[in-house]
Image (spheres, rainbow, N blue to C red):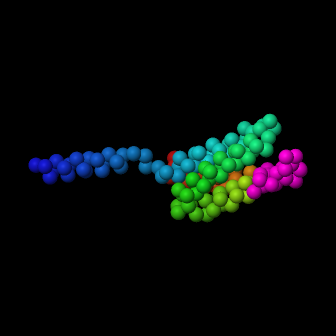
Amino acid sequence: MRVPLAFATTAAVVALAGCGSSKPAYCTDRTNLNNSVKGLTSLTASSGISGLTSQVKTIQSDATTLVNSAKSDFPSETSAITSSVDALQSAVAALSSSPSAAQIATVTKDAASVVSSVKSFSDASSSKCS
């Protein structure tokens, strides 16, 4: 009697384990990165370069997490995220305490590229994360 009971218990545990979310882990990572990118728009002039630098570090961390969890399923999109985030990080790191118009333009362009690459990933993964 113990063998069938043990088998039934094991089968029930396996069945329940499959009842969780069927969404891949990168769906949560995608949400986190989207929220971090949206955080760029909430920065104000009083946030200064240090606020921008801090937000870009958050974006970089969230992007790394997303890329690590999704690169096998979305190699092109995650590569684009990595490239765009790296470019933004470099542009922000190059800012002086009184940035020139050209430096600000570069950061703006690179931030737009990050937004675009994250949107492309979101669009590509929407069927698996909705």
Report whether residue 98 is seen.
yes
Q: Name the foreground residue: 45 vs 75.
A: 45
- The answer to whether 84 is drawn above or below residue 59 in the figure is below
Q: State the predominant SS element of the stretch in magenta.
A: helix
Q: Name the foreground residue: 87 vs 26.
A: 87
Residue at coordinates 58% horizontally, 57% vertically from top-left? 67
Image position of 23 (left or right of 34):
left
| Residue 93: % across, % down | 77, 53
- The answer to whether 71 is drawn above or below residue 54 in the figure is below
Q: Residue furthest left?
A: 1
Q: Name the foreground residue: 107 vs 16.
A: 107
Image position of 47 (left or right of 83):
right
Residue at coordinates 69% horizontally, 41% vertically from top-left? 39
| Residue 69: % across, % down | 53, 56
| Residue 83: % across, % down | 68, 61
Find out whether residue 102 is within the magenta segment.
yes
Image position of 22 (left or right of 66):
left
Residue at coordinates 20% horizontally, 52% vertically from top-left? 7
Image position of 95 (left or right of 81):
right
Please give the range of residues in magenta.
90-108
Residue at coordinates 85% horizontally, 46% vertically from top-left? 97
| Residue 47: % across, % down | 77, 38
Find out whether residue 51 is within the magenta segment.
no
Q: How many marks?
A: 0
Report whether residue 119 is seen.
no
